[in-house]
Image (cartoon, helix red, strand yellow):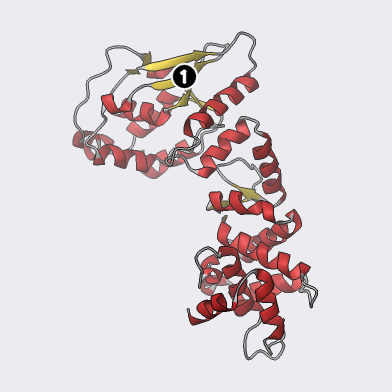
Amino acid sequence: MKKSDAFGQINAMSGIVKLIDIINIVKSIDNFKEDTLDNLKPVDDYPDGVPLDEIYIDLSYQRKLKLQELINRLLNHNGYDKTAAGHLDLAERNDGRKMCWDGFHRGIKAGIVGCTKIPCSIFIHEKGTSETKARELEANKFELRNGHASKVSAGALFKSQVTGNRKEAIETLEVMKTCKLNIEGVNPDVDAYDLGGFAFFLKHYRKYQVRNLLDASNTIRETWKNTKTMSVTLLIGLTHFLTANSELNKRVLSYLEVNRKIKEIIGTGAKQKNQQYFLKPMLKGKTAESVSYNLVEKAFNIKGESDPLYNDNGAEVKEFFSYLGLEDDELDSLERE
């Protein structure tokens, strides 16, 4: 099997899957033994433990498997270190299935190098625990264990919180659904764009009205139709701009004006500018403000235009920049970039 096909099969998995099925797909990659296994230090099987073919993974709360990264770690560390790997954490549900709520990446590595079983700690759900409740309990255990671990991304942690039915996560998910945004597959809407930089989104999105966040998302999705990813920096920066634009008691640009002008400046086809176009220059600690500045300078107040959207004598623009939260010395720094 081609590596790309194997990766595709694994990425397409959802719901509850058997750990051994993932391992078998990896080991079926063309020349995997020659390219990977033969370059690793041999490992003896564990003398005892839970058989890998009895372990399940609930992908509703687990972080996404980065298979190439996992393989690279095996190669870079000359194989699988059983002592360093420790044990897996399992939760046995009422139907007898053992769910790995933490450590399934280690389980895959163990199976790749030839182990058939692995040491585990097993938590047994109380009798009568529903499937939904069991999933919530496991997801909350995952978050408690990994919430402050740098190796777990903000998106993966959020996914576990959604599955764990955490109130704040569910509220955030509703906003994301409204704005057609996605991370780690939590929003099944086919029109939703994947967010890059989710921690930044979580930190800042609550500062703004959902209406402005939605308008920013719509503009980005309509401008860059041939991608399914969205820069969080641009999203928050454009939302910051739209918020100031709607609140300042001067000329207010309509959503249609903003949308039209951004599309016009970005262009279409092979020469279309990417989302990074509005992200430079950038002041440290003033991300949203910097993007708003760039939007004004690059799209709405272009010098030399016969009819700029903002008064080109500088008065309205300077007042707007001040309202955005940019001081004179910061404007000087941006202008010098």
Give the residue number, with chain letter if any, for mark 1. Answer: 90
Q: Secondary structure at mark 1?
A: strand
Find residue 136 and report its horizontal and vertical position in percent. 61, 25
Q: Nearer the viewer, residue 262 or 22?
A: 262
Name above or below for residue 26 compared with residue 237.
above
Q: Residue furthest top?
A: 127
Instruction: Give whichever of 329, 177 is nearer the camera.
Output: 329
Between residue 141 and residue 328, name the one nearer to us.
328
Q: Position of residue 93 (x, y in %)?
A: 55, 14
Q: Position of residue 17 (x, y in %)?
A: 50, 26
Name the residue rendered at 22%, 20% in the picture.
Answer: 44
- Residue 151 position in % (x across, y down): 42, 40
**Quadrant including the N terminus:** top left
Residue 178 as seen in the image, left or right of residue 193? right
- Residue at horizontal 63%, vertical 91%? 304
Residue 216 appears in which quarter of the rendering?
A: bottom right
Q: Residue at x 29, y 21 (%)?
A: 115
Say what amino acid the circle numbered 1 marks: Leu
Instruction: Identify the image quadrant of residue 217.
Output: bottom right
In the picture, measured across the screen, residue 174 lies left or right of residue 228, that is: right
Up/down of 38 relative to 303, above or below:
above
User: Is residue 279 shown above or below 167?
Assistant: below
